Amino acid sequence: MKRNMTDLTSRQKIILSLIVHEHTRTAQPVASKTLIDDYGLQISSATVRNEMNTLSELGLIRQPHTSAGRVPTEEGYRFFVSNLVQQTALPSATRNTISHQFYQSRRGLDHWLPLAASVLANQSQAVSLVTAPHSEKIAFKHIELISIRGSQVLMVLVLVGGEIRQQILALGEVYSQESLSQTANQFNQNLENKSLGQIEALEPSADPLIQQILAAIIDQMHLTEELVTGELFLDGLSNVLSTPEFATINQDRSPLRLLEERPMLIDLLSRTVLTEDIGGVQVLIGGEGTWQELRDCSVILTRYGIQDQLSGMLGILGPMRMPYGQAISAVRFVADLLSDLVTDTLIE
Amino acid sequence: MKRNMTDLTSRQKIILSLIVHEHTRTAQPVASKTLIDDYGLQISSATVRNEMNTLSELGLIRQPHTSAGRVPTEEGYRFFVSNLVQQTALPSATRNTISHQFYQSRRGLDHWLPLAASVLANQSQAVSLVTAPHSEKIAFKHIELISIRGSQVLMVLVLVGGEIRQQILALGEVYSQESLSQTANQFNQNLENKSLGQIEALEPSADPLIQQILAAIIDQMHLTEELVTGELFLDGLSNVLSTPEFATINQDRSPLRLLEERPMLIDLLSRTVLTEDIGGVQVLIGGEGTWQELRDCSVILTRYGIQDQLSGMLGILGPMRMPYGQAISAVRFVADLLSDLVTDTLIE
DNA sequence: ATTAGCACTCTCGACCTGAGAGTGCTAAAA
DNA sequence: TTTTAGCACTCTCAGGTCGAGAGTGCTAAT
């Protein structure tokens, strides 16, 4: 069923491309005459109609009703994305501006991730999704214990890769800040770069303080390990609210619903993108049978970060008729940017 | 213009209440006959119509068109909320379930805040908003410096109140972890509980390491101070997408737009709720003239936390015809819950 | 003060209709 | 064999008409 380049004449490819382009612009069926008038084709509309017929038979375009123009089918978009789309690199001025925003104040991920989401949403005119990077393997880097009040202690746990977990512990008795710091230092010396497995295999200590802290460390590391992905940042909802595809407010079928159900969303992300290597961009068109809610949508996803060490995911979700060239470029660009930033600030 | 209790006969109050209730349920204009039939009033529809006329003249209800039922006006809702609404406490079973969810695993704010948003959204069937608590006055609690790689250092700064800021510093030269820890200890001893002002007034040090760290501390404290409110959690969008008030997808007037524009949202929150003491619940009906986008919406807001020390804000945004009794109770309940949790784990 | 009764008004969905858009087909031209 | 002009045909869509039904306001009686 897979169609390849050679199935279509070059004129058919042009026509398909134009239909995709025009329909992306207007969200309306595209008439043969429109193609002649607006794109200056040097053939007649009747010829175009003949070609359209062929494309219809191939299942790449369809008519909403007998006397309407043509609309690309899901298959049509797939063919377009696989064979015809040309990436339209962002203008270098834009790229510079964006890079600057990221580099000028090095505030760290908590600043970069929302910024990435915002940039991505703007550039693609769709909803953007960005997850925080997450370590492939969980290992201890550093711990700090801070006395708060009475027997309560704030534990700050830094993992290799840079994830930071914090927890407030209610210890059995009151410890001085000095003894807490000492204990933390012991941990720092003994556990650095140890994996969760290694730490769990340690001899239990007789010291109740050490016991409690160790338990908390293991607990937090488990929690981190169970995470498929880190925090999720989302932007550009308003880009998409006014599009007819999303205006399908009719009950629960709306793609917007998916965006609210974090578990579903995580599932979507992980199924598609987590298998892929960093650098590859995946385009998911029309839910691919699995995602009812995405019937009229497309998703473009990729990973960023450092292969086998620390990676996050980012992408966009928009109507199926989206400017794929721009969108894919934008995703690539932002992913590369984030990869660089993560590499620069990796905690080893 | 302010209307008080005594302006209305008790029968008028009942009728107004019923109209509000019924319209909340159906989103339709309420007919006089409906009130007789569905609520078993012991008077005739003609009498009800007479009373309705009075209420219309008072500006509390209105007719969408000549021969339609009545709909509460903005004023009507205000009167209802000020004088007639009765808080319908959550069933104690529900309260227990919810409390349990919060208390069973004490994972800290990063777990509680999204949970609060989720609970609030469910209970109110509206969009919920929850901000992280933010200190009233910024003061130093603890610092930690962790060598990462080469001359890069991860600084973890804990402020009084418990806010944690992290930053990766590229220092001029390479320092050993020992010397970093020592430096951190110095800071911890000298700066504990010092305010931003006090820290800025310190004598500059000759040591370049100390200089750089101090600058970073001051920088981060400034950033924190400038924050009006912490992170923002939002839930329950789907509750509201299907309501006619929000379906007004017609371009930029949609209240949904407001939710995407964090600055606007922060502005909204701060103007209304930040002036208020903790414990008070504010109800903002129909944008109150200031917020075009909220013409058909209401917002219920309150603060939680510890007066003059550490507080956040939470609330809901929904259609103007919302079940105010339930909604206000839900907001109160969740706010109290969070206040308790924050108090328990306050970092002094 | 309340209510039955009734005329009046306005909305809403159903139905019809004509204009326009766009096609498919055929027969001629290249 | 491919392209194109021409035309009949189909379908949508906006506008207009219409009658039923909902709900009111008013009046006169209780």
Image: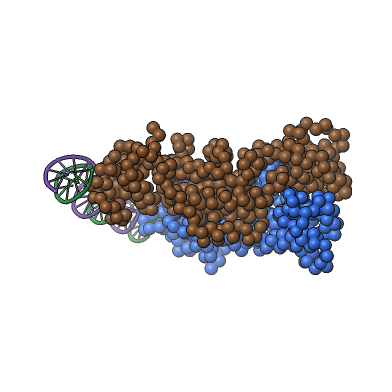
Chain colours: A blue, B brown, C green, D purple
**Left or right of A63, for residue A115:** right
Kindly tell me whether residue B303 is visible in this rendering: yes
A203 relative to A311 in the view: left or right: right
- Residue visible at 57% across and 50% down in the picture: B336
B36 or C8, which is in the foreground? B36
> Residue drawn at (85%, 57%), measured in percent from left and top?
A186
Residue B136's x, y, as percent?
65, 39
Q: Is residue A322 left or right of residue B85?
A: right
Identify the image quadrant of the C terminus of chain A.
bottom right
Quarter-of-image position of residue B172: top right
Task: Indicate the position of residue B195 as horizontal and vertical percent values.
Answer: 73, 36
| A266 to B279, vertically: above or below | below
Query: What is the tally of numbered marks visible in this picture?
Result: 0
Image vertical order of residue B13 relative to residue A272, above or below: above
Q: Residue C19: x and y, percent? A: 29, 46
Taking depth in this image into account, of B303 and A136 the one nearest to the observer is: B303
Residue A83 shows up from this direction: no
Residue at 32% x, 42% y is: B9
Name the quadrant containing residue A279. bottom right
In the foreground, B63 or B6: B6
Image position of B184 (left or right of A262): right
Q: Position of residue C13 (x, y in %)?
A: 29, 55
Q: Nearer the viewer, residue C20 or B28?
A: B28
For the point 74% across and 49% down, which residue is it? A148
Figure check: A202 above or below B208: below
